[in-house]
Amino acid sequence: MTQEMKGLLLEDRWAPVTSTMGFLESGAEQAAQAFANWHKGLEISRGLTVEVLPVTGTLEQVLSSLLPLTSGEGQRRYLFIPTRSTWTAYVESGWTGTDAASAMSVMARKLSIRCLRVVAVPHTLRGDRGRYGAVMLEVYGPKQPGKLNNYVRALAASNDGGRWVFDQSGEPFPFEQVEQYQARRVRDRFTFEMLKDYLRHLGLSPFEEDFYMPPGARAWLLQKTGPFTTAGREYTLEEARAARVL
């Protein structure tokens, strides 16, 4: 972990799973059941079974229910983790990490709630090893008349193949440090510290382990089984991390 992102969730040892996370402004069980109903509608014609299972334990024990991680279609798992707030965290079993954008966009519309996509990846690229850095926040809401998408606000500073770029869309929140968006160095326009500050204003502390799994709470694992078109490959967390040069 680089100094610029000191304080990532679980010291980043669950990357790439937790490098991108979704958050839904809903209870965990309600979110999981709504997600399952959506996917049952998609998968019933293919003969796949979608079930929702309760999971208890520490945060790392709960995350372990996603294993093994998978590529291709494979057997897919989706996890909804309660927090000490009104938000529920969302991660997936994909071996390259969680693809939260489409899921959070759809769930925001289906439940008429706010959903977030949060990305925090340290820039560790040296030669052909390491990762391209990124700090991103996307806020989705219910679909609004006249708009093609349901973005409320999006901010990103990321290394795009060797060049840092900054992007934003939507109206700034009152708590944003808008003057920072003019910083000379592009990567300084939206930093990890700014991301954490913005999330605190939204009621989240997603990089702190004790933010998750309050006493007595249960997480919910959605699991798909059945005749997949392609088998895919299974990975341990260690194999996925090695392949992603972590």
Image (tube, helix red, strand yellow):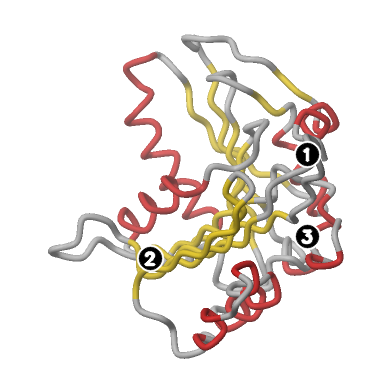
Mark 1 and mark 2 in contact (Cβ < 8 Å)? Answer: no
Q: Position of residue 173 (x, y in %)?
A: 44, 83
Give the class, few, some or many, for how many residues have Cα within 10 Å of label 2's Cα (few <14, many ≥20): some
What's the CA distance linking mark 1 and mark 3? Answer: 15 Å
Task: Please give the count of numbered marks on the rendered protein.
Answer: 3
Which residue is nearer to you in this view: 11 or 88? 11
User: Which residue is at a point 58% across and 27% down the rendered structure image?
Assistant: 76
Residue hosting label 3: 9
Using the image, determine if residue 85 lies above or below residue 218: below
Left or right for 230, reference 44 = right
Q: Earlier in the sequence, mark 2 or mark 1?
A: 1
Q: Earlier in the sequence, mark 3 or mark 2?
A: 3
Q: Of tags 3 and 2, which is closer to the observer?
A: 3
Using the image, determine if residue 230 lies above or below residue 116: above
Q: Which quadrant of the figure has residue 92? A: top right
The kind of secondary structure element at disc 3 is helix
User: Which residue is at a point 44% across and 53% down the rendered structure image?
Assistant: 104
Label placed on residue 33: none
Q: Position of residue 72 (x, y in %)?
A: 56, 20
- Looking at numbered disc 3 in the image, what kind of residue is underneath it? Leu
Which residue is nearer to you in this view: 114 or 34? 114
Residue hosting label 1: 64
- Looking at numbered disc 2 in the image, what kind of residue is underneath it? Ile
User: Which residue is at a point 35% across and 21% down the rendered structure image?
Assistant: 44
Mark 3 and mark 1 in contact (Cβ < 8 Å)? Answer: no
Mark 2 and mark 3 in contact (Cβ < 8 Å)? Answer: no
Q: Position of residue 217 (x, y in %)?
A: 69, 60
Label placed on residue 113: 2
User: Which residue is at a point 86% across and 56% down the rendered structure image?
Assistant: 1
- Looking at numbered disc 1 in the image, what kind of residue is underneath it? Ser
